Image: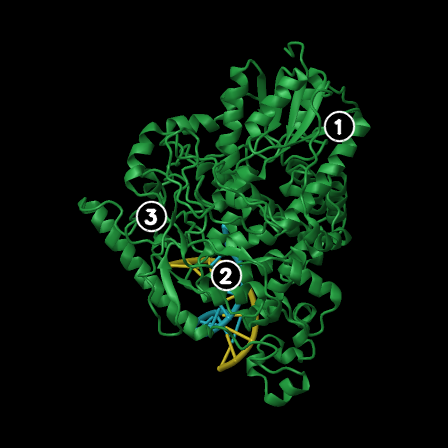
Chain colours: A green, B cyan, C yellow
Amino acid sequence: MSGGGCSIVWFRRDLRVEDNPALTAAVRAGAVVAVFIWAPEEEGHYYPGRVSRWWLKQSLAHLDSSLRSLGTFLLTKRSTNTISALLDVVKATGASQLFFNHLYDPLSLIRDHQAKEVLSAQGIGVRSYNADLLYEPWDVKDANGNPFTTFAGFWERCLSMPCDPEAPLLPPKRIISGDASRCPCDTLVFEDESEKGSNALLARAWAPGWSNADKALTTFINGPLLEYSKNRRKADSATTSFLSPHLHFGEVSVRKVFHLVRMKQVLWANEGNKAGDESVNLFLKSIGLREYSRYMSFNHPYSHERPLLGHLKFFPWVVDEGYFKAWRQGRTGYPLVDAGMRELWATGWLHDRIRVVVSSFFVKVLQLPWRWGMKYFWDTLLDADLESDALGWQYISGTLPDSREFDRIDNPQLEGYKFDPNGEYVRRWLPELSRLPTEWIHHPWNAPESVLQAAGIELGSNYPLPIVGLDAAKARLEEALSEMWQQEAASRAAIENGTEEGLGDSSESIPIAFPQDIAMEEEDLEPARMNAHTIRCYEDQMVPSMTSSVRLEDEPSLNIQSTAEDGRAEVPTNTNLPQEPTRDAVNPRVPPTALTQTRRPYTAGIALRTSVEDSTAESSSSSDVRRERDGGVVPVWSPPSSSYTEQFVVDENGIGTSSSFLQGHQQTHQIINWRRLSQTG
DNA sequence: GGCCCGTTGTG
DNA sequence: ACAACGGGC
């Protein structure tokens, strides 16, 4: 079968040698060339952030040294076009087969399919495998054979599938190296000079690489796992598994995690250890959410940029540069929120609990467009993960059938006493509040003047007053929601009458540009009690800020019909996006020129429009804040077809029709039907 | 001990 | 929206 030539193993986010089905299969087939292709421009707006690139760099070095000890090495290529880079490698090595493991983000779904087509056409055997999930998304269906639309059902099904998840594979004992002598390595640059200082700090806290991931897993299972349930309320992340960045880059197999944790559960169950049993269930649930994020991405490839329940596109977001900046800088006046944002800023890490706190505050109190928040997370999190983050933000934003209720505002003061009862977390990250007694630590605005004075706090000066009052936020939210439902109803009525397609869809919605990045200005820093170290971090952590003149706009809905017909253009690659090699690369810039949709298959259907459309600016009662519909943060890919709206629109029963976006599009659906293309074996 | 009601947790 | 929980009566 190997037909003479060697095999290419194409590494992506499966940077491990253990339980790596593609690697194992390739090794079985004979000589192997392992390759990693760095083509971040293809990711468009989702160019990885600084800390994420730092991790990747370390992880690749680790993988390379593992491969070397097994008899080969990691061939690295720098490219702006993954497919052609793959082709080059195939030609230079005389390979006859390509092996890789599946990914489920929308870009990869298309790119990987394209790789199969192109390489197969060249006579190369292409095989792909599941290495990232317990079960492939297309294998998990409800009783009617439809994809689940809520997590609980999905996870229940996963836990009761007829076959257990595959047992993890051992690492190969030895790898016969293919001949890559005519294919030199490119040096991959993941950080620039300005980033090195901050990145150096990361190495103190984190050890990327598959064998370190394995250690982290063992440490967690033998330690914090037992009390996972008890500790889940703490703001402190000391008791979390710390596995998320490892999992993101595939340094540890989720199936291995699952099996080891399950074994522990059986053990504890036999001992009658209730707490341990519950802890395992809870931990597995978070593994399940990760699975579910891939599941959603597969079934709804637009979920990272479009609300799954259509009504949210009518929500009048508050467009306020100041709010956004205050949130990023941790200067909202709510200590728990601010502490979280400072921690994120300084370390790239946040306990899941606190992620919920800050994102919920972002969406419900500040009412900023959720995709801005998601993008900021993407840029700053060490474990930035498109699918997981999209799921998280949609959950917070109330756009999943099983979301949090949008109209319930979480109270950061109460959450503060719940997650950080002694104020230790706040004091660690907000040095300016460190002398405030616990009684007031989560609501300094109520503290008596004498107390504030004794603590050296002058509200509005060295620590802000609440940027928005909770009562005001609540009133504003109710107003906005009722406006949203009104618009939604009007739009629906218009559609039903056939009077107009998508009223309020493209005609009324002026998507909000994703903010451009600029460096944090010096005077914004909080100099008090910061040592040189910390200040350095602050300087290095670039944050976006907004311009209102550049806007992204949805594709005109006219295009929807026609593209749905040929069924191909709806899933894009972003190769056309000019990607500046920015200093910090925190935020790719919005290109200044309009790109209109091309009809080439698989080509970016990104409609970017520069407009100086400012006319919808309204002043609201509270401040001179603008509201606009649809947070047009992200490059809007070619339209998700008319059926997009149908797919999740709530019917009379309040249940979203679960018909998959992909089902309506045979060709696309085929694209992703990996099973017919290859299977492990 | 039951019952009412506000709070909390829901993925 | 709804169920489970808990404090007060």
Using residue A252 as the reference point, say whether residue A599 is left or right of it.
left
- Residue A360 marker: 2
Q: Secondary structure at mark 1?
A: loop
Q: Is residue A541 above or below residue A531?
A: above
Residue farthest along the bottom direction in this orientation = A450
> First in sequence: mark 2 or mark 1?
1
Residue where numbered disc 1 is placed? A73
Answer few, some or many: residues within 10 Å of disc 3's Cα (few below 14, many 20 plus, some between 14 and 19): some
Please report the residue visible at 46 percent of the width from the left and 66 percent of the height from the top: A366
> First in sequence: mark 1 or mark 3?
1
Please report the residue visible at 47 percent of the width from the left and 49 percent of the height from the top: A590
Q: Nearer the viewer, residue A209 or A375?
A: A375
**How far apart are the alpha carbons under marks 1 and 3?**
52 Å
> Type of residue at label 2?
Ser
Number of marks in picture: 3
> Type of residue at label 1?
Phe
Q: Nearer the viewer, residue A634 or A649?
A: A634
Q: Which mark is nearer the camera, 3 or 2?
A: 2
Residue B9, quarter of picture: bottom right
Quarter of the C terminus of chain A within the rendering:
top right
- Are the numbered discs 1 and 3 placed on the same chain, yes or no? yes
Q: Secondary structure at mark 3?
A: loop
Residue where numbered disc 3 is placed? A650
